[in-house]
């Protein structure tokens, strides 16, 4: 049997539920906080993860979804302010929490603890709420997606390690996230030109770098070809444990 899980519908059900377990109550509280501070419509918010599927435990995370570019930007700005205020139980990860997250992530993403802390410590789409992990994923509305199935071809060409400078980070909060890059230097692997972006479908690569920062990244090189003979190359992260992107010191 196939079941379609709808994050926005589940949140609506959660808001109407009379008796909530602790995880449900905290997920609803965090969503209410974001809705109020970002001034977005309830229909642009959803609850995902183990809560949505009914597979949660008492220790499970809070997984939220935000729909629509403008709504995502509002929520991101609200989260940034909430983390700075430190008066509403929304907090960036502590050193101990980062260590625990590193131990979990290191199973399928290889990097040093120092690089991990430098990259992860300034993120706001992840953190803790009432000492429970939360993860917020920003996705665009279908109406904002111009690409249709089959209109763009993606051809894997092999792996590469590069250094580059971030030239545009306007898509860094979204899943998938995209970073435009310049001053690209091949350190290892497949050489292509022009390699113009770094992309990932994994939420852990959101907020990874900012405009003007130099990064070192390792992933899969893809040729991205549109049917009108327009093409470019990108580095895709997230398929292997060896894929990473860190800020260069």
Image: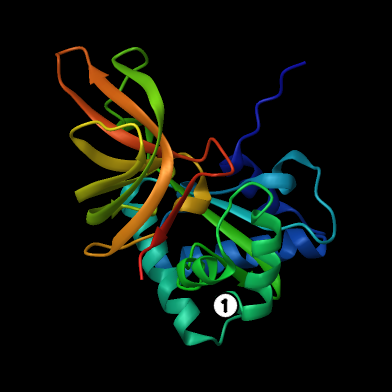
At which x and y percent is residue 18? 78, 58
127 horizontally vs 206: left or right = right
Which image quadrant for residue 3? top right
Coloring scheme used = rainbow
Quadrant for the N terminus, please: top right
Q: Is residue 47 above or below residue 98?
A: above
Instruction: Compare residues 149 and 25 and report the one nearer the observer.
Output: 149
Locate residue 96, reporting x and y percent.
68, 78
Residue at x 34%, y 12% (from the top left corner): 150
Question: How many other residues sit within 10 Å of disc 1, few (<14), some (14-19) or many (≥20)?
Answer: many
SS category of the residue bearing label 1: strand
Q: Position of residue 154 (x, y in %)?
A: 35, 20
Between 157 and 59, the one nearer to me in the picture: 157
> Is 86 situated left or right of 139 in this image?
right
| Residue sitting at x 54%, y 44% | 242
**Residue named by callout 1:** 91
Q: Is residue 129 visible?
A: no
Q: How many marks?
A: 1
Residue found 80% across the figure and 65% down from its top: 22
Give the quarter of the image for residue 159.
Answer: top left
- Residue that lies at the very extreme toward the front in this rendered image: 188
Residue displayed at 67% across by 46% down: 49
């Amino acid at each position: 049997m196939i079941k379609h899980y709808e994050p926005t519908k589940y949140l609506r059900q959660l808001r109407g539920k009379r008796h909530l377990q602790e995880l449900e109550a905290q997920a609803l509280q965090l969503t209410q906080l974001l809705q109020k501070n970002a001034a977005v419509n309830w229909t642009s918010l959803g609850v995902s993860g183990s809560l949505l599927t009914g597979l949660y435990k008492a220790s499970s995370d809070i997984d939220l979804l935000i729909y629509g570019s403008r709504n995502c930007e509002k929520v991101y700005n609200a989260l940034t302010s909430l983390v700075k205020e430190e008066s509403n139980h929304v907090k960036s990860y502590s050193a101990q929490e980062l260590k625990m997250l590193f131990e979990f992530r290191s199973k399928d993403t290889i990097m040093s603890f120092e690089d991990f802390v430098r990259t992860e410590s300034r993120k706001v789409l992840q953190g803790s709420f009432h000492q429970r992990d939360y993860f917020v994923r920003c996705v665009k509305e279908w109406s904002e997606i111009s690409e249709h199935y089959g209109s763009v071809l993606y051809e894997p060409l092999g792996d590469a390690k590069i250094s580059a400078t971030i030239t545009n980070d306007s898509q860094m909060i979204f899943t998938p996230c995209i970073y435009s890059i310049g001053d690209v230097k091949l350190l290892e692997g497949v050489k292509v030109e022009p390699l113009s972006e770094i992309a990932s479908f994994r939420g852990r690569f959101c907020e990874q770098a900012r405009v003007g920062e130099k990064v070192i990244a390792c992933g899969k090189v893809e040729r991205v070809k549109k049917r009108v003979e327009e093409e470019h190359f990108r580095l895709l992260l997230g398929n292997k444990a060896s894929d990473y992107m860190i800020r260069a010191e």
